[in-house]
Amino acid sequence: MARKRRGNGEGSIYQRADGRWCATHSVGCAPDGRRRRRTIFGESKEDVQNELASARSKMLAGVFTEPSKIRVSAFLERWLEDAARPTIRATTHASYKGVIDNHIAPRISGVILTKLSPIHVQALYADMERDDKSPRLRQLTHAVLRRALKQALRWGLVSRNACDAVDPPRVPKSEVAALSAEQVGTLFKAAEKHRLYALFVLAIGTGMRMGELFALQWRNVDLKNARLQVRHTLMELKGKLTLTEPKTSKSRRRIDLPDSAVEALKAHRLQLIAAGFGEHPWVFCNSTGGPLRRSHFHRQVFKPLLKKANLPDMRFHDLRHTSASLLLAAGIHPKVVQERLGHSQIGITLDTYSHVLPTMGVEAAKKLDGVLRLSAPKRTKVATAG
C-alpha cells in the first residue's frame, strides 16, 4: 500500500512502497473528454514538489495548454513553426506567416480553437472583402487556414475542419497576358544592345521561370547539343539570395533549345569572357559577376525595356506565358508544352492556356477531315429529277 504524505495545497503527492516519492497532476483533456494526467517521480518529497511547481508554472505560461483553452492565434503559431515549416519552402513560409499575421490573426485570433465555427470563417472572408482585399488573397487565406485546421483535426484538437463547411472565395478567371509574335520581335529589337539580351531570348525560347533563369549555371548548359538542364531556382527572401531545388520533380527538366537561343547564348558567353567573367558560374550575372536580384532586375532592366519598346506593362512571368502561347498556337502538343514549362500536371497547362486551344481544335478538325476524305470510298452522285 502506498503511504500518502500530503501537505496543504500539494495535491496528490505521496510516497510509494519502494520509498520513492511521486505526484500526479492534470495536463488537460483528451479529445474524448477524459482528463489526461502525468506522474512525476523523485527521490525525495522536495524533489517532487519542485518538479510539480515547475510543471504548473509551465502550464500557466502556456507551455502546456488544455485543448479546450487553445486560441486560434496560439495554434496557428505552433502549426506554422512545428508542422508547416519543415515541409514548405522559405518563401511559402513567409507567405503563410504574412497571411496569418496580417489577415487571420487580427480577425479571429481570440476565438477558442474548439469553438471556431464555419460562421467565424465565413465572417473572416466577408470582412476581408469589405476591406477590398483581392480575391486571390482571400483564396490564399482560405487555403492556409484550411491546411492548418486539417492538421488540428489530425492532432485531435478539433472535431471537424470549419473551412470544409464554407464556400471558398472565388477568383475570377483572367486571361493570361502574352506578347504576339510581332511584339516579341519588337522586344528583341529594343533589347539587342543590352548585355542581358540572351536572357530575354532564353525566357521566351524556353518558358523558364525567372528564378530558374537567374539560377542557371554554365555547367547545366550544353550548347553543342542545344539543350540545358533546369536544376535549381534562385530565391530572394528578406534581401538574402538562396539557391534551392525546384518546387516539384517536374520542374527538374531538360529543355531543348531553339537555334536562336543557342546563337544568343554563344554571343553572350563571349561577352562574359571579354568582361572578365568567363570563370564565373552564372549564365546571367550582374555588373560585378554576381547573381541577379529580382527587385533590381525589374526596376533597372525589364520595366525600362518595356517602355523603350512601347509595349504594354507586364510581369516578367508573362514572357513564360508568351512562350507557351506561341508553342500552342503553332500546333505543338500540350504535353510537350507541359514538359518544357515544368508543370506538374497537364491539366494546369490546358487550363492556363485554354484561350489558345480553340484554334488548335479547328486545325485538328481540318486535318482529320483530310484523312477522312482520303479514307472514305468514292461515292457516285445520284441524279435528282428536275
Image (spheres, helix red, strand yellow):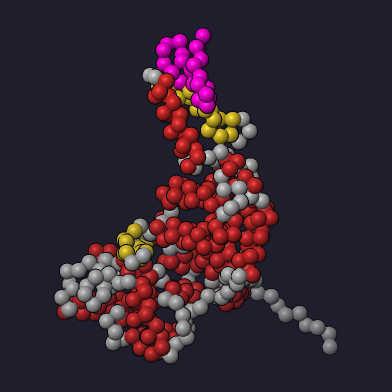
Would residue 383 be found to the left or right of residue 145 on screen?
Answer: right
Q: Quadrant of residue 119?
A: bottom right
Vertical side of 53 occupied by 149: above or below = below
Q: Is residue 147 visible?
A: no
The residue closer to the viewer here, 204 or 247, is 247
Q: Residue furthest top?
A: 1
Would residue 201 be found to the left or right of residue 371 on screen?
Answer: left
The residue closer to the viewer here, 253 or 108, is 108
The residue closer to the viewer here, 291 or 15, is 15
Q: Quadrant of residue 319?
A: bottom left
**Residue 15 forms part of the magenta stretch:** yes
Question: What's the residue at 34%, 58% (across, down)?
Answer: 244
Q: Residue furthest front?
A: 8
Question: What's the residue at 44%, 26% (across, down)?
Answer: 49
**Residue 358, how many percent across, how many down?**
59, 75
Q: How many tags in the picture?
A: 0
Q: Is residue 134 visible?
A: yes
Would residue 328 be found to the left or right of residue 243 on screen?
Answer: right
Question: What's the residue at 72%, 80% (across, down)?
Answer: 381
**Residue 302, how many percent across, how many down?**
37, 81
**Residue 222, how many percent across, how many down?**
27, 67
Would residue 359 be found to the left or right of residue 166 on screen?
Answer: left
The residue closer to the viewer here, 290 or 20, is 20
In magenta, the rendered stretch is 1-22
Question: What's the residue at 27%, 81% (across, down)?
Answer: 195
